[in-house]
Image (cartoon, grey):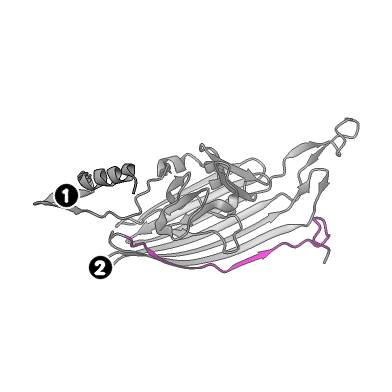
Amino acid sequence: MSPALTLAFALLASAPEPTTPASTDSARGGDEFKTVVRPRDTTPPTAVLDRARLEETAGRDLATLLDDEPGMDVTRLGGLGAFATLSIRGSSPEQVLLALDGIPLNPADGAPVDLSTLPLGPLDHVDLYRGRSPWALGVTGLGGAVLLHSRRAPERVAADAELATGSFGTGVLRAWVGGGGLSLAIDGLTTRSNFRFTNDQGTAWTTEDDRLVTRANADSSSATILARAELDLDPGRLTLLDAWTTVDRGLPGLGVNPTRESRFSKERHLHAQRRDHEPAPFRRPNTTRLAPTATEVPDPLGEIGLGSG
């Protein structure tokens, strides 16, 4: 062995063993350090939209609310009530996780979540994660997560309602009642979206064929009924959810090639339960969900390329 290597080994053998300083996660008992293990799910959200913030969105929907937040980019294929997806800081919509009371809402086929099918009225607050999502959900979103938390029923019965109307036949109805651990919420939206616009017939180089026309087949209606029950167990808590959602909207096509009868309809029935245990290391809530969904896209005239019939 060379003299240099011999000297190096001698220095390492004579060096004192490193000591680990006490941290906030350690407590000294006698001459020993006892490590306090904390639960892993301690990632705070980057933003929280509380109930007061949600109440400012009268007559609007969840997509409009999220689009106002930094880092949140909503792509909407039309006006109010149209198909809408969310991107967080440049991610794809498929990389964003959405959950309701800890129940993931992303389809099993990896498709993005349509924000227009999610209710806004029964929510108490919304947690935004622009990055890593909480591990307790059991799944993760590479781009981030949006966690929707429905309102918890108080001991005494309470209720409120909201009714809003707007242009182009737009109407919003939201109602909530709860008490004793049980709550029921109704969230409905309808709009004709029949605004007028200038149709240039696809000829931007001339205005001789421009016409003022009314947007056709752009109506949309949706409704959600959400029932929630919360039971205190020893130990932990059990939450039961039952949400029925229906959506029916026209597929208007391009301005130069409007449609008349192409439609989209979707019906989803979410049954879910979540069992929360007492806080403990490496323990996450147990969740079970069943979400039968039926989707129809009738195109009787073959206006959007699906073929007639």
* Nearer to us in this view, 5 or 266: 5
Residue 278 image position (x, y, % from top left): 28, 61
Residue 206 image position (x, y, % from top left): 89, 30
Query: Visible in this render: residue 19?
Result: no
Q: Main secondary structure of the magenta part?
A: loop
Residue 221 image position (x, y, % from top left): 63, 54
Residue at 30% from the left image edge and 43% from the top image edge: 8
- How packed mark 1 is, by other alpha carbons closer than 10 Å (few <14, some 14-19, many 20 or more), is few
Counting residues from the N terminus, which is met first, the one under dot 1 or under dot 2? 1
> What is the magenta range?
282-307
**Tag 2 residue:** 234
Asked whether the beta carbons under mark 1 and mark 2 sit within 8 Å of each other, the answer is no
* Quarter assignment of residue 294: bottom right
* Quarter assignment of residue 293: bottom right
**Mark 1 → mark 2, Cα distance in angstroms:** 29 Å
SS class, disc 2: loop
Q: Is residue 204 left or right of residue 237?
A: right
Query: Visible in this render: residue 163?
Result: yes
**Tag 1 residue:** 27
Residue at 91% from the left image edge and 31% from the top image edge: 208
